[in-house]
Image: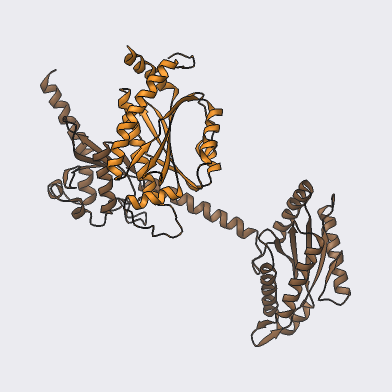
Chain colours: A brown, B orange
Amino acid sequence: MNSNKSSDTINLAADIVMNIPTVGLFAVDTRLNIVLWNRFMEIHSQLSANEAIGKNISEIFPDTDINWLSRKIKGAVILKTVSYSSWRDKPFVFFLSNPRAITSDEEFMYQDCSFWPLKETSGTITYVCISIHDVTEIACTQKLIESVTEEAVRNEELSNRDGLTGLYNRRYFDNQIINELNRADLYGWDMCLMMTDIDHFKAINDTYGHQAGDEVLRVVGLIIAQQLRAIDIPCRYGGEEFGLLLPRVESSQAINIGQRIRQKVSDTPIHYMEHDIPVTISIGISAFKKNTSHEALIRSADNALYCAKNNGRNQVVMS
Amino acid sequence: MSKDKQCFSSEEFDVIREIVNISMGSAGSLLAEYIGAFVTLSVPNVRMIDQEASSITLNKLGVEYDAINITRQSFSGALSGEAIFIIDNSSNQEMSSILGYKACEDNNKNINTDVLLEISQAIIGTCIRDIGQGFSLDVYLSQPTIIGTEQPPSKLYDLVFGQHNTNWHDLLLLDIYFSIETNKIKCHALIFITEKSLQKIHAAVNQLML
């Protein structure tokens, strides 16, 4: 082989390694002292090769997790194999400033790193090489996608809720009735629907004002939610009416649940300004039977509620 | 490359098992030195598998564990494929104290992903490197990724293969079971070697059989 040509190749390779604009490359000995420092490292650490070489990593990067880094280096030396770190798990192995300092609010460069042993001809490992890829752009995009997705999920959840009470809204409830009805039908499960109305709500509004009325709605909604299981679906059906879907509950259990809610509401005067407002509710319940349509289920709970009102209010009626 | 399904004779399989065995021996002693603990490896289970067999293997493997953590890592070169590393929650916690990690500061996270990535890269990296050397095949490791943490074992197959349509048919599987500190820590490495490497393994094996 032409020795000039081969030394040319080595010089060229060294030039590439030292000046590659996209990758930080440096090497340390087994005591973590720097032995090589390329141009990327000079620029992003603002330390020249002359300043860096001979210094310990812990001096140059005092904020680096040195225990973790030592293990990485030890791994490369003993196991004689490459290992990696990803920005997802370790965003800043080395604290280098983010080159995109003006148009992003990230202070540091996100990085993917690799650590591999440099083998001497004798086979012993004297140096470990470390590469740094700047993945700030990817990390920022990924984080943006994740935050947008999270927000979309939150909005979706919010769009199913009633703003005042935090219970589900009518649109979501109507969809869920159909789903639960199909499930009950398919598996032969029981299910009950409960319609609940605050007694003399108009009088509360007229006497104490609409803000008091809102407070009553909010507290009654809270009491209802506290009495239910996680699989029950409570909603503000409209105005002062609440709808409660109780999957896998049969008539007698539903009556007990209804009585418990009714009792709790009538035992809890609602504070508003200097007033303690006494509130009662009436409840009508219908039980799902095979082939009942959802309209029929609602109608029959509404009829039961109407009976409860006519019979003097503050009571539970099973259709 | 031949379109025929790559098959190994039983003699060839014996040689492959022997090479993998020797490689695992050297990997095991390096790992013991690195971790600073007693490491035993099972005799690797070496066999050809198709997609159906892989689902049976992964479903069976899961039942030994409560909640599992899984990583994957690719290797390329003359020897190419992907390795899956599986460790259960309590083993990962034991490993964390053996390696001298401080207790996890984030209380919502039971699993220290630093530990998971460290041990999985050490085990996969060492095994792949030594297997490559055993067959005299060049091999490069890529960056690992975490597939799942604290997952029920029943989800193992879906996490590894379920998200996409796989287009492979037959792979060489090296299934290795590790026990560290006499069963305090148990973990598994499944090394799937691609069809395109099989011919090279075939040639390497026949060279050795001469």
Q: Position of residue A234 (x, y in %)?
A: 70, 63
**Quadrant that contains the C terminus of chain B:** top left
Q: Position of residue B200 (x, y in %)?
A: 37, 19
Asked if residue A153 is positioned above or below residue B50 in the image, the reply reads below
Q: Position of residue A213 (x, y in %)?
A: 70, 77
Q: Quadrant of residue A225?
A: bottom right
Q: Quadrant of residue A198?
A: bottom right
Camera-side residue of B27 and B200: B27
Camera-side residue of B41 and A285: B41
**Quadrant that contains the N terminus of chain B:** top left
Q: Is residue A245 left or right of residue A271?
A: right
Q: Quadrant of residue B56?
A: top right
Q: Name the residue: 83% across, 76% down.
A: A313
Asked if residue B72 is positioned above or below residue A175 in the image, the reply reads above
Q: Is residue A169 left or right of residue A49?
A: right
Res. A1 in view: yes
Camera-side residue of A251 and A1: A251
Res. A89 in view: no
Q: Is residue B139 left or right of residue A233?
A: left
Asked if residue A212 is positioned above or below residue B186 in the image, the reply reads below
Seen as rendered, the residue at the extreme top is: B210
Q: Name the residue: 35% across, 53% down.
A: B97
Tag count: 0
Q: Position of residue B20 (x, y in %)?
A: 36, 27
Q: Name the residue: 34% across, 18% down.
A: B204
